[in-house]
Structures are given as C-alpha cells and as structure tokens.
Image (cartoon, helix red, strand yellow):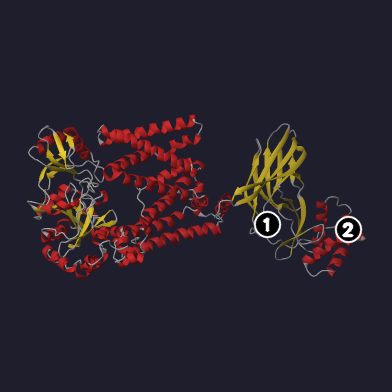
Amino acid sequence: MTLRYVYALAALLTAIGLSMFVYKWQVLGFPVTDNQKTPIWTIETSIHFDSGPGSIKANLQIPTLTPGFRTLREYNVSKGYGFSLNYVSGGREAQWAVRRSDGPQTLYYRRVVYEDSGSDQSDTTPPFPPPPVINEPFKTAVEVIVSDVQEHSADTASFTSELLRLANDPSPDANVELLLVDAETSAEFVQTITTILASARIPARMIRGVVLQDQQRSIEPLPWLEIHDGDRWRYFNPNTGDESLPDRYLIWWRGSEPLVRVEGGSGVEVNFAVQKNHLDSIAIAEQRAAMEQSRLVDFSMFSLPIRTQAVYSVLLMIPIGALVMVLLRNIVGIDAFGTFMPVLIALSFRETQLFWGVILFSLLVTLGLSIRFLLERLRLLLVPRLGAVLIVVVLLMLVISIVSHKLGMETGLSVALFPMVIIAMTIERMSVVWEEQGPANAIRGGAGSLVVAIFAYLAMGMNWLEHLIFTFPEMLLLILAAVILLGRYTGYRLVELSRFKALAGN
Amino acid sequence: MLATVKEMTDAGVLGLNQRNAEFIMRLNPRRLYPRVDDKVLTKKLALEAGMAVPELYGLISSQGEVRNLAEIVQDRESFVIKPAHGSGGDGILVIAAQSHRRRGSYRMINGMLMTDSELKHHVSNIVSGQYSLSGNRDTALFEYCVKFDPVFAELSYQGVPDVRVIVYRGYPIMAMVRLPTRASDGKANLHKGAVGAGVDLSSGKTLKGVLGNDVVDEHPDTGALIAGLYVPHWDQILQSSARGYEVTGLGYLGVDIVIDRKHGPLILEMNARPGLNIQIANCTGLAHRVTRIDEIFDAKADPVTRARIARQEFAAERQTALPLNGAV
C-alpha cells in the first residue's frame, strides 16, 4: 500500500518535473547546454542637428514589423526631450520634442534584435491603390510600359519581375528612360517603380532597412521593393528583379516618408550603426516567454537579483550532493560521519579545488584530532569541550592560512571556506569513535566521509549539470523522485555482498 | 570476492536496507522506542512483567548529584555504570572491585585502577549526554555487576558474555552468544571486536563463531573451541526473550540476556535495531525464518508457547553439518 503511494508520488513528481522541463526547453527555447549563445544586434540611429531658436520636434521612423527578426528591447537616449511613440501610416514613429534648446543636438534611438526565422509577422492586406495622378507625357509612358509588361507576365509577381528587368535594362527603351531620368538615388528609383505598379493596380511600397553585419558605422538604409499579391507581401530586389530579401535585412521603415523630420532644427544628419553581441540564450528565451506572457518564467530563478542567483546556482547543487550521499550510503554502503557533513565539505571543495581541498581537510582533521586528544585529558564537560574544539579548529584554520601564505601557497588561504562547525563536530565524533571503537573504525569513517565528499564534489562540479539545474530547477523534482524511490530500496548494499559472503555458499 | 545477489537471496540473508524498511519501520513504531532506548524504563517494564533484571543500585541524573557517587556504590564490591540512553555499549564502565588499600580508587575488569575523580568525570560525561543517542542530558545507571556463569569462562576475555536473541513478532528466531575479547575491551558488542557464536535454537548448543565478518572456530584470546557448548537455562532464556515482545510491543527486537551464576538469566537490555552479524554467526539468513513465522503466526500464543514453537521450528541440523571453515 505504502509502496504504491511511493511509486505514485515519484511518478507524479517525475511527470511534473519533466513536463515543465520539456515546455521550457521546447516551447520557450531555454537552452539545455551552457554554451548556447545567440547573436544579437544593436542598431543605433543617431540624429544630429543644430537647434533653431524655437521649439524642436524630431520624428524618426522606427521598425514595426521585422520579418526574420525579433526585438529584445528598444530605447532612446535624449537629454531633456519629451519622448513618445506614435503609430503612423507607414508604421511607427518616435517623436522627441523640446520647448527650447541650444547648440548642436544629438538624439539616439537603439533597438536590440535577434534572428528568429520563425518570426513571420503578418501584415494587413492593403486595399488596391487608386490609380495615381500622373501628368503627361509620363502618363502615356506608364500606360505603354504597363501594357507591355502585362503581355510578358502572368501574375503580379512576374509582372513586378518583368518591370524591374525592363527598368534595369542597360539600354532602356525610350518610355522607361523618360520615367527614370529623374531618379538619381535608388530610393527615388524604387519610388518610381511603385508608382508604375500602382498604375497597374498592384499594391506596392518601398521598404528601407539595414543589412546587419558584425560591426558597422554609418550605413545607408538599403531600399527594397515590397508588393502584395493579394495573399501576402513579397519582396523584390529593385536592381535585378529577383524575388528575395538580402540576408539579415532588418526592415526599418516602409513607404516613401523620409527617415527623419526635424522641425525647428537645421543641418540634420542621420547615422546608422550596428554592433553585434552574443547574449545568453536564456535572456532571449525569457524575453520570448515574457512576450507570450508565460507565468512559468515569472517565477523562475532569473527574476531574482543577480547576486541571489549566484547563491542559488550553488545551493541548487546541494540536492545533487544529497543524491550522491544517498547512493553511496544506501546502495554502496559506505560509512561516513554525519549525514550531510560530506556534502558540505564537498561544497567547500568547490572553492579550494579538489586536490587542495582533500589535503587541507585531512590536515585540519588530523591536527584537530590530536589537539582533541590532549583536551580529553583535561576532562572537560561535553559542551565546553565542543566549544574548545571549535575554537581550536578556527585557530588551526588561521594558522594554516598564515603559514601557507608565508610559504607563497595562496591555495592554503581557502581553508577559511571550510564549514568550521561541521569540522569541529566531525573531529569530536571521530575522537569518540576512536576511543570507543578503535582507530580503525574512526579512520574508516573519516576516509568514508572524504570519499563521499569527493564523489559529491565531482557530481556537483559538473558544469553542464549545474547549468541544467539552474535553468530548469524543476529537475530537482526528478531528483526528489529518485531519492524517494531509493528510500524504498530494500535490496542489498554493495558492501553487504562482501560482508555476508560467508553465508552465500549455503 | 563478492557474493552474488542471487546467492545472498537464496541464503535468505537480510540486508540493512531491508531490515530498516521492512522490519524496523513496519514493526517498530517510533513511539515505542523509549521503552528500549531508556534503560531505566526498560528495567521498570521488565520488572513489572515479572522478568529478572540486574538489580538497580542508583541513578545519577544531574551534574549536582555526581558527588553522591560514593554513597551509591558504598557497599557494593562491584558494579556497572551505564548511560540510560546509550547505544552499542558505549559509555558502559564495569568496576570489578573497589580498592581496599587505597580509598577512592576502583579496579576495572581489565585490572587498571581508576581514581574517584576519573570515575566522576565519566559519570558527568554520561549525564551531559556524551553517550546518549540524541545528545541530550542523560541519566547514569548503577547496577549489579553480573557474575557470569562459568560455562563461558573459557570463552571470555574479561567482561561478561551475553546471549542475544532476535525476536520476530514475539517468536525467537535466532540467537547467538557474544563473547568479549581483548580487542573488545571486555564488552560484548560485535562491532568492538567481540566474538559472536551462533546458537542452535532447538538445543541451545553453540555453533561456530564470527569475528568481524569472518567465521572463527576458536576464541582469539583463550584459544578455546567455540562450538559445542550448551547454554544453560535455555528454555528460560527463550521464554524471557519472547516475553520481550509483550513488554516492548516491538515486532523486531533484539533481547540481550546475561546468565548470572546466582540469579540465572537476567535481561540486560533490549534493542529496537539489532545488528545483522548474527546471521554470519549462525551461518543462516534471517529472511527464511521470518517467512516461516509469518506463516505460523498466532496472535493468541503466549510467550511460553512461542518459545516452544521456536525450538521446534529452528533446529540447526543443517548448520552443524557444514564444514567448520564455513562457506568460501
């Protein structure tokens, strides 16, 4: 009956732990291994201008829908300006405003994005554009081009490709040349193309964006062509007519609006800069969870202050040590002093490193034990004697630190990280066992504790495990389930196979 | 080097995990532990049940009373000091004689003298809880020092041999004689180096001995053969042990009995977590016997009946037929 509850509880804990783990891993994208870094780009737009005499209002086009990218955060840096975000026809606009300002001004807008191919943000289907009002002789030229291209195309996509091919022809026909003669910049070129497309009742718009590379200063926004085929938006290279988007092309704004409008300022300069960084996948997963409003992450470790997180990254490994302890004591059958003393010793090994940890621990216990034997002759009562042992342990730690420092061995300093109360109790317990059950038992117990501590240290020191537990604390439920199951293990301990071997032949 | 799990299971060997989980936790409710962990209470309960125990000379339960020590032991030639909550024989001091030449000094069984102040220190250690399981303040018991029956004289090196009987749900299922050695410092605890000798339940005859985890034929200090001795008062020993079930209510119990030259079997103490080395001493696992008791268990049977059934059920013919050097 009890056994059934035990199995049910273990199964329940495992199910909860595993499902939370899988959800965070697969859905929220928390990384299972430590070295998963995601590249992020910080794009900075800086606006320089000289302030005029009156009030200043600066509008900057900023990204709205960015296929292929997700936004981690955006922020602006501007001293003394009021800041607001407005939705306008082409997307969003950042607006800075100030009543009065002197001298040259610089406003910054930063956006941090990461690549996410799954981020396919849908845009609304636009209405068919009204036929643009075009003056002669351009009107006729457009009509000729449209009917010409329509003959050589089947649908909106092939119409666009064909139009762009014609427009980019090195020896263009007279109509095309007439239309494009004024297009000096590629933005103007794309703008003219959208006008021709509008005449053919194809919704089209210019998009401008930046191609993200590792590190760039002063990049010019790259214009591109976007058309709607009645179903979705498609992207065309205005220079070749190919349907494509450049790699890592972050769409900054759509439409023919200028990037920046400054009222009350002069000498406006806009500059794009890109910086690539690497960020923990965890931060990104968190961000994503926050966007999906997942309560699971609200209560995760990452919502704690960094310093507390550091404490927990160590504390969360203690259950691993406990599991090792349970395995070694109940399955293997190693004798050790104190139930969790070896785990605490293993914790301090993390600071001292294994080799020095073992040496310092043995040294401390040996010295403490010899002084404890001297104390025995004084016939002190129990509690004062424990107090005396504790003081001796503290003094020994101090002496070891000072001596090793003088000898130039800085590792000796880390002896201060040993849990002194635990060591004092170990020494006391060991000396009692020494007297009552002989040195052999005492040394065996001491060595057993050390062995358990070493195994616990090795298990707790596994980086991938630490990362896994820290990122997925629900894994502790699995460990709890394992410990509960081990608690009902009634088979033989490994050492019993040797202990009772005399009986085995019968 | 190692036995396989199957060999062990076939031999019916009981392991520590199984003992803890299936016997101690199932059959020994924790609320009953004080009955065996507190030797003062055990003694009282045993007396009420009409069992023979070593006479209690006095108790010291606070540091202030330590100075009464001389009064308590005044007229006693020999005596034993025990912590009421001790375990595994820790803190037990046997005083064989009070020195007549020097007042205030005591002779221990190993011949060493102990001064009055040393003895008081020991008692105050007991009272402060050094030997208590929980580390809490404790009581020191002063009681009759057993003059053991000469039948084991050849098999003991100082100290008092005793008989340990494992009682399962009121039925004695296995027994051994624990023989002190030089290494055990006169104590009858196996983990301190005493020799355990299995006892055939039906006849009360000793089988081979076990020292540590190894089978031995002779006592390591005296060289006397261990096997073949008949434990005196065997019926009474088994009946007293069986009665331990009624006294303590514990379903898995170790009863320690000493055989006094004058008073016969006396209950020394009882144990809610008896060790497993008794299996080696008897060359038999406990598991098969436990299964057998579960088959024939009768809640209405009285201690005498249960002791008789144990003598019928657990004859050791199988063990005596084995070669002396045991299984390899």
From the viewer's perspective, tell me whether residue B262 is left or right of residue B2: left
The chain that hosts pointer 1 is A
What percent of the width, then of the height, locates residue A420?
Answer: 38, 37
How far apart are the two marked residues, 1 and 2, measured between alpha carbons? 35 Å
Quarter of the image that includes the C terminus of chain B: bottom left
What numbered label is drawn on residue A502? Answer: none
Q: Is residue A108 left or right of residue B79?
A: right
Tell me, yes or no, if residue A492 can be seen here. yes
First along the sequence among labels 1 and 2: 1
Task: Please give the name of the residue rendered at 44% of the width and 44% of the height, measured from the top-left corner.
Answer: A347
Q: Which mark is residue A138?
A: 2
- Estimate how packed mark 1 is, as few (under 14), some (14 to 19) or many (20 or more) residues with alpha carbons within 10 Å: some
Residue A496 image position (x, y, % from top left): 33, 58
Towards the viewer: B298 or A428: A428
Q: Position of residue B116 (x, y in %)?
A: 16, 33
The label number, if any, that marks residue A67 in the structure image: 1
Residue B268 visible in the shown view: no
